[in-house]
Amino acid sequence: MNLGLLFRDELKGFYKSKVMLTLWVGLPVLTLIIYFASPTNQGISLASFTAVIIGSIGGMLSAAMLVSSIISEKSRHVYDIFIIRPVKRSDIVLSKFLATYVCVTTAGIIALVIGILFDLVRNGSLQGDILSVSFNALIMAASMTAIACSAGVLIGFLANSMLTGIILVLYGANQLSVVAALPGLLLPNEPLLPLIPGIAVTVVLLAITIKMFDRKQL
Amino acid sequence: MNGEDKDPRFLEIDSVTKKYGDFVALSDVSFSIRSGEIFGYIGPNGSGKTTTIKVLVGLLTDFEGDVRFQGRSIRNNRMMINKELGYLPQNIGFQEWRTVDHALTTFGRLSGISERELDSHIRRALERVGILDLRRKKINQLSGGTIQKVGMAQAILHQPSVLILDEPMAGLDPTARFEFKRIFQELRKEGSTIFFSSHILNDVQDLADQIGFLAYGRLGYLGSMAEIEERVRVPKQIEFVLGTGSGPWTDPGPGDGVEMVGNPEPGRYIVCLSPKADADLVIDAILRDMLAKGCKVHKIAPIVPSLEDIYINYLARVKV
């Protein structure tokens, strides 16, 4: 019950602090600006271009969001008054992960849907296998974002300074999320394959974070 | 709740030692708190007060010894005990986006208050700390003292049987401190057990049924104000004030039962008694001497040591 409550609470926090609005409006707008700013992009569909953008910045964005919010809340002892209640520490970790993941993935889906609709309006129909390309890209982005989110949670609870946290995100979380793309290099025709390393790495990183936070002396 | 109903071991701290590397923050600290009593915890900065509190509330779990709540060890019953616990940390922090109402809604739900009862609990807690009108305000728009009141409201929201408060009145203005003291007394009447640390010794003296002195990680004294006075033995002093128009008293200096006589202002004498002196005999002898020297005596009164006097005396003794 507490996990659901904390998850909704985190989402409400994203909504109230305008993070949700910035992400959901910001990511599609950013994608459109980059797409139209460079004439070389015009040859490819907006949906495909959006998929590339989501894959490249979605993970870093979510990890950075998590690290900054967790380190800031830790330094202000926000978690103390959660932990002294009948709440499992794992629920706090998981709610942070899930809320950020849902928020960033939703922003990616919104951006992708806008891209597909734009292509549809521009061309009158969807050319080639744009839907399957978009779907594959979404699976890849979802896997990479999951790894980056779980790495962000781990770094957030591990690091004590914001600067260290952000450096670790750039060096660690962002690079680690590429693991999701590795199976695709070996078996390019298996679109669901990125989910396996995505889920596996995410579960391992979250388990380490939960174990560590459980033992943390606050 | 009368004295007989009180559980003498409602909260027990049993031989607790906490080390940070080689540094011993708490060394073999033991005491117990009766149900329905207010326990004041005093000690200088770095003495281990906050460490004790963090052990009590479960923020520190890596320590030697045990803490028992109504006989149950916190090591195996943390979730159950947390339902009975209210905690106000020294520096309370809330997420920036929260309103007072939203923060209390979340903490109330996490503490097990049902959706149906939540509103009345929030209203009661905010009324008690005097900020019901700020219910819809964002917490980051409030002053430090008001945030402390929101912190107090979250601590008492679920009507816990034990409240653990770390420097609850630090940073509050005199009016707010008075309100907090009133709240403590009301809660005690309702049967709550309160453990609080403070630097403001007058507050501890006013409120606490039992006082613990902590220094260098060790519990020095433990007991009621009267018991501590007896054990610390601040030198007994008697004040003599002469009436207006009286001539000065030429004191005979140290003598039978008198260690020293001070004269802080004209016509006022402070007589420090030696440890085994009989106060009545000394007063009688000095009074006779004053009258014999033509002095008019306006007032004779014992000087009751304050908790601050006792505390300073205690720290001077334990200082290495």
Image: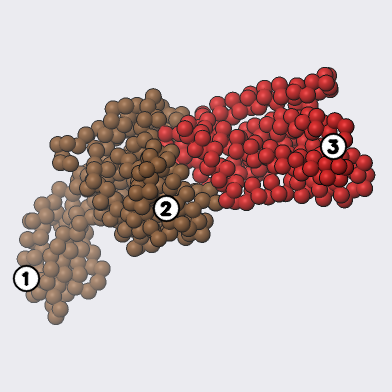
Chain colours: A red, B brown
* Residue located beneath label 3 in the image: A126
Q: Amino acid at mark 3?
A: Leu
Q: Amino acid at mark 2?
A: Val
- Calculate the distance from the C-alpha at mark 1 to the C-alpha at mark 3: 118 Å
Q: Are marks 1 and 2 on the same chain?
A: yes
Q: Secondary structure at mark 3?
A: loop
Few, some or many residues within 10 Å of mark 2 (<14, 14–19, 20+): many
* Residue located beneath label 2 in the image: B150
Q: Secondary structure at mark 1?
A: helix
Asked whether the residues under the numbered discs 1 and 2 touch, taking CB atoms below 8 Å apart as contact, a structural biologist would say no
Q: Amino acid at mark 1?
A: Ala
- Seen in the picture, residue A199 relative to B43 is either above or below; the reply is above
* Residue located beneath label 1 in the image: B292
Closer to the camera: disc 1 or disc 2?
Answer: 2
- Calculate the distance from the C-alpha at mark 1 to the C-alpha at mark 2: 63 Å
Report x, y in % for residue A173: 71, 34
Q: Earlier in the sequence, mark 1 or mark 2?
A: 2
Q: Nearer the viewer, residue B47 or B170?
A: B170
The chain that hosts pointer 2 is B
